Image (cartoon, rainbow, N blue to C red):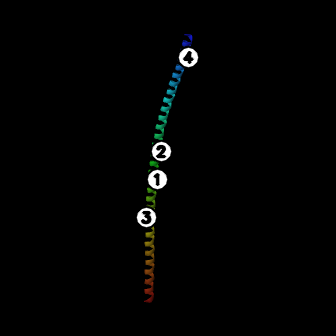
């Protein structure tokens, strides 16, 4: 009887220790699963933020490129207009000098 009681007591203690180990293992697994889900959510948030940042960056680059292109076009048009005005001024000056030269030439012949 004592041997049976001793064996049953030892089996009870071993089963309690085993049960406690199983419970602790399940708690640890549950906390790891929660931590893993939190990390997955963080990764998804980081991916979303990365793609949003990339989209904003591309949009900004496009806007800046368009701004630069527009500015270059305005400057080149302005330069062309200034050159065209200078060409007209030079032609007008040369034409007036040529007319004076012709007038002097006709006066010299008369």
**Residue that mark 4 sits on:** 10
For the residues labelled 2 and 4, the Cα–Cα distance comes to: 59 Å
Q: Position of residue 75 (x, y in %)?
A: 45, 62
For the residues labelled 1 and 4, the Cα–Cα distance comes to: 75 Å
Whichever of labels 2 and 4 marks the residue nearer the N terminus, that label is 4
User: Residue at the location (45% across, 46% down)?
Assistant: 51
Quadrant for residue 67, please give it.
bottom left
User: Residue at the location (52% across, 20% down)?
Assistant: 15
For the residues labelled 3 and 1, the Cα–Cα distance comes to: 24 Å
Whichever of labels 3 and 4 marks the residue nearer the N terminus, that label is 4
Asked if disc 1 and disc 2 are in contact, CB closer than 8 Å, the reply is no
Check disc 3 and report its element: helix, strand or loop. helix
**Residue that mark 2 sits on:** 50
| Quadrant in which the C terminus appears | bottom left
Whichever of labels 3 and 1 marks the residue nearer the N terminus, that label is 1
Q: Position of residue 39 (x, y in %)?
A: 49, 36
Whichever of labels 1 and 2 marks the residue nearer the N terminus, that label is 2
**Residue that mark 1 sits on:** 61
Check disc 2 and report its element: helix, strand or loop. helix
Asked if disc 1 and disc 4 are in contact, CB closer than 8 Å, the reply is no
Comparing 105 with 8, the one in front is 8
In front: mark 2 or mark 4? 4
Position of 25 relative to 80 (above/below): above
**Residue that mark 3 sits on:** 77
Comparing 22 with 64, the one in front is 22
Whichever of labels 2 and 3 marks the residue nearer the N terminus, that label is 2
Q: Position of residue 80 (x, y in %)?
A: 44, 67
Comparing 107 with 57, the one in front is 57
Comparing 54 with 64, the one in front is 54
For the residues labelled 3 and 4, the Cα–Cα distance comes to: 99 Å
């Amino acid at each position: 009887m004592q041997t049976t009681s001793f064996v049953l007591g030892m089996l009870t203690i071993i089963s309690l220790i085993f049960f406690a180990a199983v419970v602790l293992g399940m708690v640890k697994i549950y906390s790891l699963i929660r931590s893993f889900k939190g990390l997955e959510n963080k990764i998804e948030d980081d991916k979303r933020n990365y793609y949003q940042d990339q989209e904003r960056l591309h949009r900004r680059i496009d806007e800046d490129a368009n701004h630069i292109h527009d500015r270059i076009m305005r400057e080149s048009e302005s330069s062309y207009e200034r050159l065209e005005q200078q060409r007209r001024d030079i032609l007008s000056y040369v034409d007036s000098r040529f007319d004076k030269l012709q007038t002097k030439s006709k006066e010299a012949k008369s």
